[in-house]
């Protein structure tokens, strides 16, 4: 199996090339005894595993190509066969291998789903006669979203303790808009505009932000006066330093460019850790607990930027927001995705009506 270091440093094209090369080592697998899963009419325009992987990755977003490529490379290293000689049995062996390696069910499911996706894609393009991955089941992953929904008290604590204006506005925008990191990281001042018609509870006007995020889809989200006034304050500060033009980043790094994804994550982690919200022991790459100079465990928060998106959806629904309005704000493809927040943070249940048992007098 390729090391994680080598996988992370290569490009999707490198992975595709490695796939073609690694698949040609066949001696120990007895290729002649395996079925050849190619259409009899040779109708596919794809003529190699390498081209298939390139075409498959090209249909994925640029932000997820590396992850898909790494997952596929791990499968290629394990099976060591051209894709047309891979059977359901090989896929089942790979699933058992992942289980033996101790991967979390969520990781196991993602890795298997990547392989299944490739075989589904190849079958649609007539590279395969049959989709050998169709019958492969993936592990059920427990929905633990409820654990990742911040209470209002925790959210206010995180915001209260963040005194840096840029970072505070970043956190407020995550919560107010329900935006993803991919929505926010490349945000420019030209993507925001005043909306005098949007009057907030305090009577002041609001604004609007346009996101160009996941799946290259555009959506506009209106923002009311409290968060909008902070955005305007940040814009004024940027102007005083000769920044803040339409093409300038809203969340600028010290070097002048937009904050990177890792920098955005760091802002969120530091703010949540400072506020003491959802703390856990920090570990190194080997899983060992990190300790300070006094030997005490170093603590860090589990909170990530996406937790603010969860909080937005949950809090809005709890306070009576229309389900379809929340769906549009978050940019969910399906209303069913939005409904999962109702299950994660349910309102009144029928237990309300059977709660009249005698008090405990022990």
Image: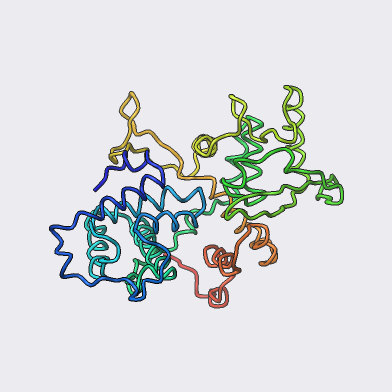
Which of the 4 image quarters holds residue 244? top right
Which of the 4 image quarters holds residue 186? top right
Q: Nearer the viewer, residue 232 or 18?
A: 18
In the rendered image, the vertical position of residue 327 relative to residue 63, given as above or below = below
Which of the 4 image quarters holds residue 253? top right
In the rendered image, the vertical position of residue 205 relative to residue 250, given as above or below = below
Q: Which colour scheme appears in the figure? A: rainbow
Q: Residue 243: horizontal and vertical position, in percent?
A: 72, 27
Residue at 34%, 74% in the rendered image: 39
In the rendered image, the vertical position of residue 347 relative to residue 232, given as above or below = below
Quarter of the figure that contains the C terminus: bottom left
Would residue 94 be found to the left or right of residue 352 on screen?
left
Residue at 71%, 52% in the rendered image: 221
Would residue 262 be found to the left or right of residue 14 on screen?
right
Q: Residue 185: horizontal and vertical position, in percent?
A: 59, 41
Residue at 28%, 38% in the rendered image: 288
């Amino acid at each position: 199996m390729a090391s994680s270091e080598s996988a992370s440093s290569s490009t999707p094209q490198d992975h595709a090339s490695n796939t073609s090369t690694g698949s040609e080592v066949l001696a120990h697998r007895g290729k002649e005894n395996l079925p050849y899963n190619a259409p009899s009419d040779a109708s596919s325009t794809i003529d190699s595993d390498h081209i298939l992987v390139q075409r498959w990755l090209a249909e994925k977003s640029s932000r997820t190509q590396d992850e898909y490529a790494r997952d596929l490379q791990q499968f290629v290293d394990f099976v060591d066969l051209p894709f047309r000689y891979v059977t359901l049995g090989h896929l089942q062996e790979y699933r058992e291998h992942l289980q033996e390696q101790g991967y979390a069910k969520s990781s196991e499911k993602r890795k298997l789903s990547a392989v299944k996706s490739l075989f589904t894609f190849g079958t649609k393009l007539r590279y395969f006669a049959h989709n050998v991955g169709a019958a492969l089941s993936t592990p059920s992953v427990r929905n633990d979203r409820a654990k990742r929904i911040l209470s209002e008290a925790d959210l206010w604590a995180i915001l209260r303790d963040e005194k840096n204006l840029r970072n505070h506005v970043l956190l407020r925008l995550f919560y107010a808009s329900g935006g993803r990191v991919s929505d926010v990281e490349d945000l420019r001042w030209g993507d925001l505009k005043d909306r005098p018609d949007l009057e907030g509870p305090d009577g002041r006007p609001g604004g609007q932000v346009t996101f160009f995020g996941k799946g290259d889809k555009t959506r506009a989200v209106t923002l009311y006066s409290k968060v909008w006034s902070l955005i305007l304050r940040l814009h004024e500060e940027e102007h005083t330093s000769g920044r803040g033009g339409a093409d300038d980043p809203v969340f600028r790094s010290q070097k002048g460019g937009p904050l990177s994804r890792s920098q955005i994550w760091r802002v969120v982690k530091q703010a949540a850790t400072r506020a003491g919200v959802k703390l856990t022991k920090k570990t190194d790459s080997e899983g060992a607990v990190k300790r300070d100079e006094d030997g005490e465990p170093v603590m860090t928060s589990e909170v990530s930027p996406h937790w603010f998106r969860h909080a937005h959806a949950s809090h809005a629904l709890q306070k009576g927001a229309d389900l379809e309005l929340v769906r549009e704000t978050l940019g969910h493809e399906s209303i069913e995705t939005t409904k999962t927040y109702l299950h994660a943070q349910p309102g009144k249940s029928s237990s309300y009506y059977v709660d009249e048992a005698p008090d405990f007098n022990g």
